[in-house]
Image (cartoon, rainbow, N blue to C red):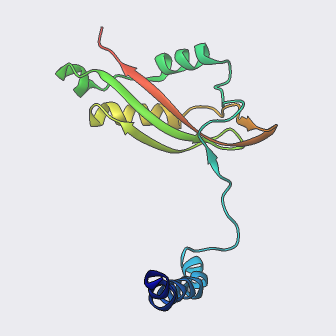
Amino acid sequence: MLRDVYFHTMVRPIALRCWIFLLASAPPLLAAQGGSGQEAPPVFSVVEEMPEFPGGQQALNKYLVDHINYPEIAREEGIQGKVILSFVVQEDGTLGEVQVRRGVHPSLDREAMRVVQSMPPWIPGKNRGRVCRVQYNLPVNFVLQ
């Protein structure tokens, strides 16, 4: 009983004041985020139809082999490994927001990014029958032979 009285007289008014403050400050917070009313479409990680390089996985592998130039400094130092890149396949198939998720060496990271940024447009991903933006992770192996 005493606990109920405490809740209704002390805790509840404080909680209501917090909600009122949050609601009163929400419009300025939204405006401060640069909201022009237009939000970018969401980026999906998993969709019904994942994006695909034109020609499929074999064509992607061939493109990487044909276009990667092993950096001379990495070759001289014997550096090899796997660079993991992340990028967004846009609704029109272009690639954007290319980032190194796990790098090996700055020269290898730059080369992997250069090759991905120079790729032709992909076949975009689809979710519920509609094209959408999809995040894609791509491992790029650098192996000295």
- Residue that appears at 34% across and 22% down: 70
Q: What residue is rendered at 54% in x and 86% in y? A: 16
Between 97 and 49, the one lying in front of the other is: 49
Q: Decide if residue 74 is on the left or right side of residue 29.
A: left
Depth check: give the residue in front, 104 or 120: 104
Q: How many labels does the image show?
A: 0
Camera-side residue of 93 and 16? 16
Q: Residue furthest right?
A: 129
Q: Residue furthest left?
A: 77
Q: Where in the figure is residue 19, as x and y percent of width and height?
A: 55, 83
Q: Where is residue 107 in the image (x, y as percent from the top left)?
A: 30, 34
- Residue shown at 74%/38% (left/top)? 127
- The percent position of residue 39, horizontal first and vertical second, equals 67, 63
The residue at the far front in this view is 1
Give the residue drawn at x 63%, y 73%.
35
Q: In this view, does 58 lie above or below 116?
A: above
Q: Quadrant of residue 112?
A: top left
The quarter of the picture where the C terminus appears is top left
Q: Where is residue 2 in the image (x, y as percent from the top left)?
A: 44, 85
